[in-house]
Image (cartoon, helix red, strand yellow):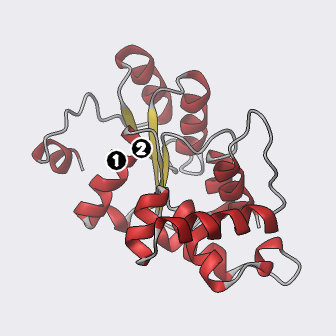
């Protein structure tokens, strides 16, 4: 991964073996983005995730991209619990798809989010009858899926071959069906993604 990033013109400030060292390096070097595996030594459980959450709390200006071998819905929800800005959650296989991986880094660097499409797809499949998402039409679900992947309205329109007004109309329907009213201090986009991940 270090070689890939360097070859693509990125500067890699450090490659670390464990979460403790990661936190120390972030404090000292203050990188733009941190790429971290959910499972790190010594126990290989969730040290990387806990470090990522701590980085988000201590240094919100630092983007965090978490990599996981498998889809772990609770981890994705935990990572996005405070904000869906400058954050990403990708399956490790996505790194081999270089353009998608680099696009995710760019979105995070620009202040957005990048959620693995397969994670989003699995979350859609797992919705249940009693879930608010069950009230969404197939088109609204597709638009919400693209939103959860971190795309802007314009990018959603391009990906789904829709007009911008159609995307906005579908998103407003999603917000209404998920009962996300206009509330000062909260982004309905982020709340919709969190509702999606938690369902």
Which residue occupies 51% across, 67% down?
146
Nearer to the camera, 178 or 182: 182
When the figure is inspected, residue 57 is found, relative to residue 170, above or below; the finding is: above
Q: Residue furthest left?
A: 7
**Relative height, residue 10 to residue 174 (above, below):** above
Which quadrant would residue 140 be assigned to in this image? Answer: bottom right
Left or right: 94, with 152 as reference point:
left
Q: SS for tag 1?
A: helix
Give the CA separation, mark 2 to mark 1. 5 Å
- Asked if the residues shown at circle 2 and circle 1 are in contact, with their CB atoms under 8 angstroms apart, the answer is yes
User: Quick one: which residue is furthest to the front in this view?
Assistant: 165
Instruction: Determine if residue 96 is in view.
Output: yes
Q: Position of residue 124 (x, y in %)?
A: 65, 77
For disc 2, the neighbor class at 10 Å (few under 14, some 14 to 19, many from 20) is many
The x and y percentages for residue 121 are 56, 77
Q: Quadrant of the C terminus?
A: bottom right
Q: At x 26% / y 66%, what residue is drawn?
A: 96
Identify the residue under disc 1. Answer: 105
Above-or-below relation of 170 to 114: below
Which residue lies most toward the right here? 130
Q: Residue at x 71, y 79 (%)?
A: 126
Is residue 37 something that shows in the picture?
Answer: no
Q: Nearer the viewer, residue 25 or 168?
A: 168
Left or right, 78 with respect to 164, comes to right
10 Å crowding of disc 1: few (<14), some (14-19), many (20+): many
Q: Which mark is residue 19?
A: none
Which residue does the image show at 40% across and 37% down from the upper left?
34
In the image: residue 55, left or right of residue 129: left
Residue indicated by mark 2: 108
Residue 38 placement (x, y as % from top left): 52, 50
Q: Secondary structure at mark 2?
A: helix
């Amino acid at each position: 991964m270090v070689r890939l990033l360097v070859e693509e013109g990125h500067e890699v400030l450090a490659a670390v073996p464990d979460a403790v060292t990661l936190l120390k390096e972030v404090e000292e070097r203050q990188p733009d983005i941190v790429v971290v595996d959910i499972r790190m030594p010594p126990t290989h459980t969730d040290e990387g995730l806990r470090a990522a959450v701590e980085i988000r709390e201590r240094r919100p200006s630092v983007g965090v991209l978490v990599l996981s071998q498998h889809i772990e819905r609770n981890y994705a929800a935990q990572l996005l619990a405070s904000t869906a800005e400058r954050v990403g959650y990708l399956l490790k296989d996505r790194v081999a798809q270089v353009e998608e991986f680099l696009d995710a880094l760019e979105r995070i660097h620009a202040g957005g989010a990048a959620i693995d499409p397969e994670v989003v797809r699995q979350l859609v499949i797992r919705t249940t009858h009693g879930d608010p998402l069950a009230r969404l039409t197939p088109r609204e679900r597709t638009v919400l899926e693209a939103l959860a992947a971190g795309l802007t309205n314009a990018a959603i329109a391009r990906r789904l071959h829709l007009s911008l007004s159609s995307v906005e109309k579908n998103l407003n329907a999603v917000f209404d069906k998920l009962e996300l009213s206009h509330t000062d201090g909260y982004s309905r986009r982020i709340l919709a993604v969190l509702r999606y991940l938690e369902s």
